[in-house]
């Protein structure tokens, strides 16, 4: 067995949430117990070697260890267990040729509720998922799938919960509505009984047509790792000021709002957001103005670090 380390590194640039990719996937490498005193140090070493960057903030997500997640295992290689991390930093140019910042919603297009992607959900994904739910082998399983559909996708008067990112990706994978499901079915058929879309192979053409609409595939299970990272960030936004790990040292409230909107995937009422940020004491005035725009100069603010010691859960709830 081999232990790996990987990180979904996230930033926002020009109101577009982005993740750092290396050869189309997240930065990852093997943990070396001789070189790396801790997992965190090993992670930072790999990130720096592959991108030339160092994130402001990292936190551990989950351990990803499904059998055959690495194709090398199919050829007789060791099972690869990867410890996944969320990393945050301001937009910074990578220092290596293989690393680039890629829009997150290229991989998870249904998660951007600021746009008209509701058509993707309402016209294609929800009908396809309803069909998948009704193809379950027992009435009980049909009911459970329909409950998951309502909870994760906001149908039948259930509000859309922007935090359920991983659950939405997992449903699409199980139903054969992302390209990784087709890749894994092809590679793993006959080698394991745990397969995506195993009861739907008679409808491959229809499934593949929709899978082409659901974003750019990634190596291994890296899209699942990204979904886990985005879900963690969105969940913590309410009670931890993580967004300031992405901001410049000074910023306008409008710039802060755009970053929060980009990563939450939702539109926010301008005055309500401004009132919330100021009333919660998350920022303080710098006494300077942003004169880069054409209109009236906007006040510049900075994160008020004292808030971390004033109460246990300072966030944007």
Image (spheres, rainbow, N blue to C red):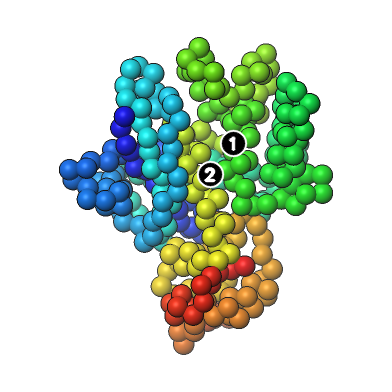
The answer to whether any part of residue 116 appears in the image is yes
Q: Are marks 1 and 2 in contact (CB under 8 Å)?
A: yes
Q: CA distance from mark 1 to mark 2?
A: 9 Å
From what the image shows, is residue 226 above or below residue 316?
Answer: above
The 10 Å Cα crowd at callout 1, few under 14, some 14 to 19, many 20 or more, is some
Q: Position of residue 200 (x, y in %)?
A: 66, 18
Q: Which residue occupies the extreme front position in the image? A: 140
Residue at numbered disc 1: 170
Q: Residue at x 46, y 75 (%)?
A: 308
Q: Secondary structure at mark 2?
A: helix
**Taking the image as drawn, is residue 9 in sight?**
no
Q: Residue at point 54% right, 80% down?
A: 281
Which quadrant is the N terminus positioned in? top left
Residue 55 in the figure: left or right of residue 254: left
Q: Which residue is mark 2?
A: 227
Q: In the image, is residue 191 above or below residue 151?
A: above
């Amino acid at each position: 067995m081999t232990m790996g380390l990987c990180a979904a590194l996230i930033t926002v640039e020009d109101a577009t949430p982005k993740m750092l990719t290396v050869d189309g996937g997240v930065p990852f490498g093997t943990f070396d117990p001789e070189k790396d005193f801790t997992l965190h140090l090993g992670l930072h070493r790999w990130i720096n070697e592959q991108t030339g960057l160092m994130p402001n903030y990292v936190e551990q997500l989950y351990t990803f260890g499904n059998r055959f997640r690495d194709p090398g295992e199919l050829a007789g290689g060791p099972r690869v267990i990867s410890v996944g991390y969320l990393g945050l930093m301001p937009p910074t140019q990578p220092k290596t040729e293989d690393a680039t910042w890629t829009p997150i919603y290229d991989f998870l297009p249904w998660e951007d509720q600021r746009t008209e992607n509701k058509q993707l959900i309402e016209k294609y994904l929800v009908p396809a998922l309803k069909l998948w739910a009704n193809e379950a082998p027992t009435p009980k399983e049909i009911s459970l799938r329909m409950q998951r559909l309502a909870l994760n996708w906001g149908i039948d008067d259930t509000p859309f919960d922007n935090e359920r990112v991983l659950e939405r990706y997992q449903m699409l994978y199980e139903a054969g509505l992302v390209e990784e499901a087709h890749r894994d079915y092809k590679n793993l058929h006959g080698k394991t009984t745990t397969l995506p879309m195993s009861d739907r192979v008679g409808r491959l053409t229809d499934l593949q047509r929709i899978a082409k609409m659901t974003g750019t595939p990634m190596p291994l299970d890296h899209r699942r790792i990204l979904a886990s990272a985005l879900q963690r960030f969105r969940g913590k936004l309410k009670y931890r000021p993580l967004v300031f790990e992405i901001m410049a040292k000074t910023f306008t409230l409008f710039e802060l709002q755009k970053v929060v909107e980009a990563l939450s995937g939702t539109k926010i009422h301008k005055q309500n957001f401004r009132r919330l940020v100021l009333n919660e004491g998350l920022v303080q005035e710098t006494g300077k103005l942003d004169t880069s725009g054409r209109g009236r100069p906007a006040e510049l603010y900075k994160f008020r670090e004292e808030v971390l010691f004033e109460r246990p859960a300072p966030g944007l709830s």
